[in-house]
Amino acid sequence: MEELALFGGAKTKTTPFGAGKRFGAEELRELEEALNQNTLFYHFGNKVKTFLSDFNSMYDVTYSVATSSGTAAIHVALGAAGVTVGDEVITSPITDAGTVIGILYQNAIPAFADLEPETYNMSPASIEARITKRTKAIVVVHLAGNPCDMDAIMDIARRHKLVVIEDCAQAYLTRYKGKLVGTIGDYGCFSTNDFKHISTGDGGIVTINSGEDMDYMTAHAFADKNYSRFGAVVQRDITGLAPNYRMTELQGAVGIAQLKKLGRICERRTVLGDRITQGIAGAPGIRPHRVEAGNRCTYWFYMLRLDLSALDCTREQFCRALEAEGVPNRAGYIPSVLYMQPMFQNRSAYKNSAFPFELSDVAYDAGSCPEAEAILETAVQIPVSEFYSDEDAEAIAAAVRKVASAYSKR
Ligand SMILES: *Cc1c(COP(=O)(O)O)cnc(C)c1O
């Protein structure tokens, strides 16, 4: 057996991983044009409008709204859908805080469904089990660019008359049975924060998929203080509460240039992630990041799981050994399932208040989503970049195989 680099053996990965510049002359030209408009306001300029129309063409949707972040995009979808005080919203316990922030700002209560062990996405059976008479919506999270089981989820939503909001912050050009995620539910929410497939510094997009003008106008207004700005018609009566989540022309300008790169970015990520999966197939104690047949994952990251009963090491030892082989990685993902975080354990979102948690019986007990907890305890996250070469992916797989064989109990 090959000696692990951790114990003085030869390192698997000795050359640097592929790297590159995300922004260039294209972004600069768009930014210059934006400034030359002499306005940076989305309603007067053309950059945000062009960004959205390019996005709509790429996704083949009619309506979308730009926002200041992915968190804002999700809040806009919830607000536009009428999610309100005392409603329950079912979502994933393994996600960014941005998935639940809008729920609580609407004074609705997040409830968490358990996950599938191999895709790390919400289990339809668990979603259905968490539905109560207060449930109003489901926020599905396509984690790491891997699509949720949307047929089953849409079927549950229709039967229980629930709104479906897709959190696509990690899932650009992800396909579920050929369909782009973000176009399947009632709303699709994207983030262009600096860590996502494409970046505008910060920013977000909401798609409105009902095909109804009215739903589009409601979402549009909800991102802009409930003001309605359509062409020359501007209506500023205050008919209800809405935040200011507007995107500026500077973000729109960068977004136009970034969108042109998105196809290639996602293609590379799909190839690289799938290659890692092929390369580690059958390695002892390794459970690859599963993508169901017929789906396309665009790997915002790669996350495998360890079967520690088959390995003679802890996860931390495995991660250190992999690091020593020259493959950067992280044990787990977020620090804990969301419901174990202090805000949920203390049932306090607003300082000195139990509102809105006190309106519902949703519990946040340890063990309530056992599979999600087990995923976080056994996961190893490996970064994927569109700048990686095929050889980089092969080296990642080779290093995982080497460490797995070295610690295998077989
Ligand atoms: C990044 C992210 C968000 C929030 O996006 P921001 O632009 O950072 O507000 C929400 N959900 C998921 C799954 C994310 O990865």
Image: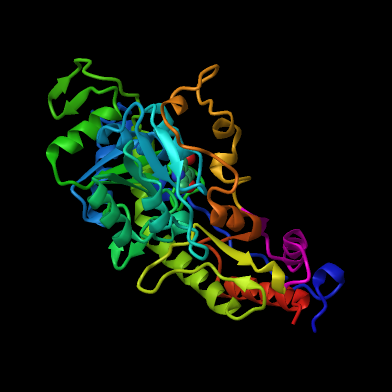
Q: Position of residue 125 (x, y in %)?
A: 39, 57
Q: Residue at x 51, y 18 (%)?
A: 353
- Residue 399 on the magenta span: no
Q: Is residue 361 visible?
A: yes
- Residue 261 horizontal/vertical position (percent): 39, 57
Image location of residue 159, percent across then percent down: 23, 51
Q: Is residue 28 visible?
A: no
From the viewer's perspective, is 396 left or right of 101?
right
- Up/down of 388 relative to 260, above or below: below
Question: Where residue 307 sits: x, y (%)?
Answer: 66, 69
The magenta segment:
311-332
Position of the C terminus by quadrant: bottom right
Residue at (63% x, 72% y) in the render? 286
Identity of the residue drawn at 12% across and 24% down:
233
Q: Is residue 325 above or below residue 261?
A: below
Is 323 a magenta residue? yes
Which corner quadrant holds the N terminus? bottom right
Instruction: Examine the image and state in which quarter residue 254 appears.
Output: top left
